[in-house]
Image: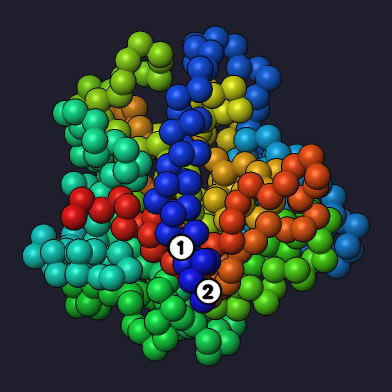
Amino acid sequence: MPAEVLSSTQQEARQGAQTYLDARLLQKSISPLQSTESFTIPVIDISPSFDASLQERKAVATQIRAACTNSGFFHITGHGISREAQDAVLDLAKRFVKNLDPDKKEALHVKHSEYFRGWEPSDYTFTNPSDRHVKGARPETKECFNWGYEEGLDPTGGDGHYCELDGAIGVTANVWPSEQDLPGFYGTVRQYYGEVLSLARHLFRLFALSLDLEESHFDSMVTHPSAIARLLYYPGQENPQPLDDSGEDKEVGLGAHTDYECFTILLCSSASGLEILSPENVWIPARGPTAPENGLIINVADFLMRWTNGFYRSTIHRVVNRTQHERYSVPFFFGVNNDTIIETIPSCVTPENPSRYPPIQAGEYVLERLKATASD
């Protein structure tokens, strides 16, 4: 990798991303109690995109384009992920948190992993690194288990060329609870991960069409992708507070942030908690009255914003569980092959809108972002 790309990757991961986040969070917004009728979260039925008709796929891509140029956030239905796989992986998140002994969790602690794989307790990271410097900042309440791509989880079997975030080849980075400690853990992960990985590759073809690119434009970049997933748990609050503009939340599950990769596919339990920053800079609950029953949440992440020169917006979001009920979710962060260098798509650059982003190396960028969140 050229030295100038490595240098810009590290700088963009540590400074550029934080600058974007801080600028949005500091923007003046209207009160969240005022009318926000100008903003609605789109619901897109993608089932026609599995049709053989290119016209049908382009029609779905047009809806995706509209969502991505607004807030970068939308629900999808007709996605094909089985209800069985969804329920099983959400139950797995609960089993991991409730049933695995503390000493077994400690053995899987992310501090033992160069790539942040394994168990992550609430006090080990601040998702927004700036929160660590706030006087009296309380730890985020989330607890999670992280894993990444491996060929055994890929329904295609992979292409044999996977490399880790830092470019290392032949590394076994994932760690797993033993079958004795949590029976069926790996099998449940493999079933859900395989289904959502196939969906992610399909969605990326729709993203290509939405940008007036060839449908296969990204195909060669996702043959061994940086597809990181998490099992997340948010405890209920003892004294839940409604969303308002009167002050800061005391119990934050996950601080305000953007995701690092191309886009995120999120499965969550019925408990509320996810909030997004709308284009008017208003915090909006993601699971409002229009949220579909069997929908998945999609949000644009930093790679896609950079690739499109800011045309598609990376969604700023957070999690505040404003109920006494436990919340579980399974985000799937879909990126490209770790050895990909991301540069602005030429068609997104014009004399009036020159490229805003220097080239970055995909895996190193994600790794630097992860390092910035860690307490040590």
Q: Quadrant of residue 352?
A: top right
Disc 1 marks a residue whose amino acid type is: Ser
Identify the colour scheme used: rainbow
Q: Which residue is mark 1?
A: 7
Image quadrant containing the C terminus: bottom left
What residue is rendered at 77% in x and 71% in y? 216
The label on residue 2 is 2
Q: Residues within 10 Å of mark 1 (few under 14, many from 20)?
A: few
Q: Residue furthest front?
A: 4
Whole-angstrom CA distance, mark 1 to mark 2, is: 9 Å
Which sits in the foreground, 55 or 182? 55
The answer to whether one can see residue 313 in this image is yes
Mark positioned earlier in the residue sequence (1 or 2): 2
In what element is the residue under mark 1? helix
In the image, residue 261 above or below residue 130: below
Which sits in the foreground, 299 or 329? 299
The answer to whether one can see residue 225 in this image is no
214 left or right, relative to 3? right
Whether tag 1 and tag 2 are in contact, CB under 8 A, the answer is no
In what element is the residue under mark 2? loop
Disc 2 marks a residue whose amino acid type is: Pro
Q: Residues within 10 Å of mark 2 (few under 14, many from 20)?
A: few
Q: Residue 315, percent across and down?
A: 55, 40
77 left or right, relative to 59? left
